[in-house]
Image (cartoon, helix red, strand yellow):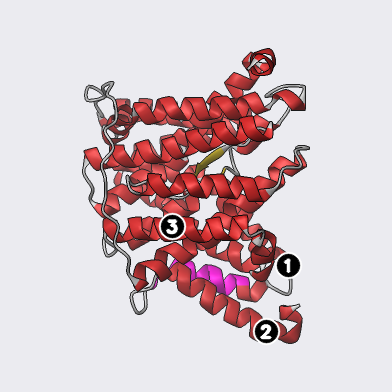
């Protein structure tokens, strides 16, 4: 404990707070879209936010102290995007069963040391094409909102561009503030319903079906490993932290299991906000940046306790606000995945097919477009590349 207090620094604490604020500013909007698709109650939405926040809080604090590295964890944003297309056909109980299945599979992959083997088995372009297809509809939603609420949508778009130009590090946080102001001024949104309230978790009985396993659990494993753990580990190692994947995947998947019963989707290593806590802005001394990871968890803990307040804020604002915020927050992720999907010439056509199939939103035999995107895309990859594709 003496070393912990010695290593405390204001920049690291601020970095941890900013990482949480960015997550609540952007990726959380996807969660509210999923909740709207499922038609869940405000109380259940509060439980969801409590669960994802607590999962990130516990795993982030434990791993950062244990590994002495700024391990930033969060919920799977691409995995959450899957839910929007699956609800309401997929029941909430089936979703919880799929969360549990995904957590168990990820745990086995992590502790067995087969993470790198698993990732190598799926061509990078195929995985990126699926993720780009999942996220594409969110990007489109940001602009279709112009049809119904032009002033708010255009105002947020202009704000995004200006903030991206002037304050790139704080774009999402500033966009959240600007969006709230614009919603109140232009759309007459009222914040009188926003209140301080302690979250009350709601237990959800899981249900397992083959359809939910193939449509949600398997794609969730795939996007979590390739879209979150892989880049998240790369960011940590690129920042000079030679941490192993096994303890990180093990802890996050174990934390995911109990949180799933209250609506919490898979806990993963953060890929977007991790850079905030691993860079020099968190501390000049890399050995003291783990404090940023610890306080990232602490602020998630606070957010989880007051999940009801967060929910009341989002539900007080127009649906277009959430749609535009989510879409603009994911532009970088969409661009990055499209680039990765089309970067490798030998994978390009199969990856493009994966993207189009996934983005189409098609459903066959009760299985989602994400599942068929990978199946069709990988099949095309094997045919187009022949024996070379299997090396």
Q: Determine the CA span between mark 2 and mark 1.
A: 13 Å
Please tell me which residue is depicted at 34% across the width and 51% down the height of the picture.
Answer: 34
Instruction: Decide which of tag 2 and tag 1 comes sooner along the chain.
Output: 1
Q: Main secondary structure of the magenta part?
A: helix
Please tell me which residue is depicted at 74% across the width and 71% down the height of the picture.
Answer: 345
Disc 1 marks which residue? 344
Which of the 4 image quadrants contains residue 87?
A: bottom left
The quadrant of the rendering that contains the N terminus is top right
Which of the 4 image quadrants contains residue 354?
A: bottom right
The correct choice, above or below, for 80 with respect to 216 in the image is: above
Give the secondary structure at mark 3: helix
Please tell me which residue is depicted at 60% across the width and 44% down the height of the picture.
Answer: 271
The correct choice, above or below, for 208 with respect to 316 in the image is: below
Residue 355 part of the magenta segment: yes
Residue 112 placed where, x, y %?
63, 60
Disc 2 marks which residue? 384
Give the secondary structure at mark 1: loop
Q: Nearer the viewer, residue 139 or 388?
A: 388
Asked whether, in this view, residue 226 is left or right of residue 147, the answer is right
Q: Determine the CA span between mark 3 and mark 2.
A: 28 Å
Does residue 146 appear in the picture of this structure?
no
Disc 3 marks which residue? 137
Q: Determine the CA span between mark 3 and mark 1.
A: 24 Å
Residue 303 part of the magenta segment: no
| Label 1 neighbour load within 10 Å: few <14, some 14-19, many 20+ | some
User: How many labels, in total?
Assistant: 3
Q: Which residues are magenta?
A: 351-362
């Amino acid at each position: 404990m003496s070393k912990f207090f010695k290593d405390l620094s204001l920049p690291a604490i601020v970095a941890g707070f900013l990482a949480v604020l960015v997550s609540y500013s952007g990726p959380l909007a996807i969660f509210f879209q999923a909740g709207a698709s499922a038609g869940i109650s405000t109380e259940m939405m509060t439980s969801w936010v409590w669960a994802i926040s607590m999962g990130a809080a516990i795993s982030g604090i434990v791993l950062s102290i244990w590994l002495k590295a700024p391990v930033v964890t969060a919920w799977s944003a691409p995995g959450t995007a899957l839910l929007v297309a699956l609800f309401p056909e997929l029941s909430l109980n089936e979703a919880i069963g799929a969360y549990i299945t995904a957590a168990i599979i990820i745990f086995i992959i992590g502790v067995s040391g087969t993470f790198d083997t698993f990732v190598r088995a799926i061509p990078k372009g195929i995985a990126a094409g699926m993720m780009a297809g999942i996220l594409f509809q969110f990007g489109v939603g940001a602009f279709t909102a112009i049809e119904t609420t032009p002033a708010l949508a255009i105002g947020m778009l202009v704000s995004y561009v200006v903030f991206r130009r002037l304050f790139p590090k704080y774009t999402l946080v500033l966009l959240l503030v600007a969006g709230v102001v614009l919603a109140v001024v232009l759309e007459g949104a009222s914040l009188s319903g926003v209140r301080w309230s302690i979250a009350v978790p709601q237990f959800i009985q899981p249900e397992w079906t083959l359809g939910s396993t193939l449509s949600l659990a398997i794609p969730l494993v795939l996007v979590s490993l390739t879209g979150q753990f892989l880049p998240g580990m790369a960011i940590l190692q690129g920042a000079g932290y030679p941490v192993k994947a096994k303890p990180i995947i093990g802890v996050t998947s174990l934390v995911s299991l109990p949180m799933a019963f209250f609506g919490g989707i898979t806990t993963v290593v953060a890929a977007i906000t991790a850079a905030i806590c691993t860079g020099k802005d968190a501390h000049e001394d890399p050995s003291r940046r783990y404090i940023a990871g610890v306080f990232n968890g602490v602020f998630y803990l606070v957010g989880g306790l007051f999940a009801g307040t967060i929910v009341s804020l989002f539900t007080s604002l127009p649906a277009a606000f959430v749609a535009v915020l989510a879409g603009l927050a994911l532009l970088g992720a969409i661009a990055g995945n499209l680039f990765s999907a089309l970067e490798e010439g030998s994978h390009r056509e199969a990856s493009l097919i994966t993207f189009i199939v996934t983005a189409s939103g098609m459903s066959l035999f009760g299985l989602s477009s994400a599942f068929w995107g990978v199946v069709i895309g990988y099949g095309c990859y094997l045919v187009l590349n022949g024996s070379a594709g299997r090396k």
